[in-house]
Image (cartoon, rainbow, N blue to C red):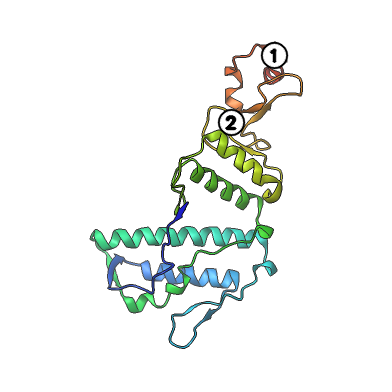
Amino acid sequence: MSYEVFFDFSAGLAQRVRVPQGTKDAIAIHVASVEQALGLLRTQYKDNPVHWDNRRDFSVLDNTLVCETVSCHNAWVRRLYADLAAWTTTPVPAPWEWLTPQDAKLFWHALEQLIVEPSQWTEQYYRSRMECLYAVMRGRETEGILWDVKALTSQQAAAVIRLFAPFLEIGDLRLDVPHGHDYLASSPDGGYEWCGDGKRGCYRAIASDDVWQCRRSVKKCPLKDEQYS
């Protein structure tokens, strides 16, 4: 597996970049909101660049707040990385403003992707992490992660997700891949139904809209029995 490093090994902008007007203000607002929400403090050692203090403890904060803030921030970092790459190669139409290396020093410390410990994961955050991993295992570059070996089949990737579930799952999502599809779904929210009652059935996840297409006769399919009863 390989990972896009984004800003991890960069010290700042090498030259000024023309960006859409309002970009600098938007960046400042985002950084301030993340620092306030997570209690992140700026620190600096001698002449080294400013960075967020590594002595951080999110466990004292609400789990939902942490997960939502980190998800939003990490997506923002990846989006800004893509935007800067585009703005350096394609002229930005008016109105625009200059983003200078000096400007970048004010926020470059915040271009760090943050991590939430599994002990603080919410149900939604767990689901988003598993959906990301599923897409990666299927060979789709996701969030800067690339599965650079032969992609797993949808069922193989689903099996890996199920393997993680006893150790990481929050709530009762029962994530699986509906037969014939290529995405993770949850049973409790109606994403799929399990076909099998211990005596008969397909013994696999079936998308709710696909039950009627089952090739088994009504007598051999417990899901069809439920629909036609």
Label 2 is placed on what type of residue? Pro
In three-dimensional space, the C-alpha distance between marks 2 and 1, rounded to whole angstroms, equals: 19 Å
Evaluate whether residue 76 shows in this view. Answer: yes
Picture coordinates of residue 113, whole percent (x, y): 50, 64
Which residue is labeled 2 in the image?
178
Q: Earlier in the sequence, mark 2 or mark 1?
A: 2
Q: Where 121 sits versus 154, above or below?
A: below
Image quadrant assignment for residue 131: top right
**What's the mark number on residue 220?**
1
Image quadrant assignment for residue 9: bottom left
Quadrant where the C terminus lies?
Answer: top right
Picture coordinates of residue 168, whole percent (x, y): 67, 51
Residue at 24% from the left image edge and 62% from the top image edge: 94
Q: Is residue 23 left or right of residue 200?
A: left
**What's the mark number on residue 117?**
none
Q: Where 226 sits versus 8, above or below?
A: above
Q: Residue furthest bottom?
A: 46
Q: Where 3 sits versus 17, above or below?
A: above
Crowd band around label 2 with a 10 angstrom C-alpha radius: few (<14), some (14–19), many (20+): many
| Secondary element at tag 1 | helix
Evaluate whether residue 93 shows in this view. Answer: no
| Secondary element at tag 2 | loop
Label 1 is placed on what type of residue? Lys
Residue at 59% from the left image edge and 69% from the top image edge: 37
Picture coordinates of residue 42, whole percent (x, y): 52, 79
Picture coordinates of residue 222, whole percent (x, y): 71, 19
Q: Are marks 2 and 1 in contact (CB under 8 Å)?
A: no
Tell which of 192 and 21 is nearer to you.
Answer: 192
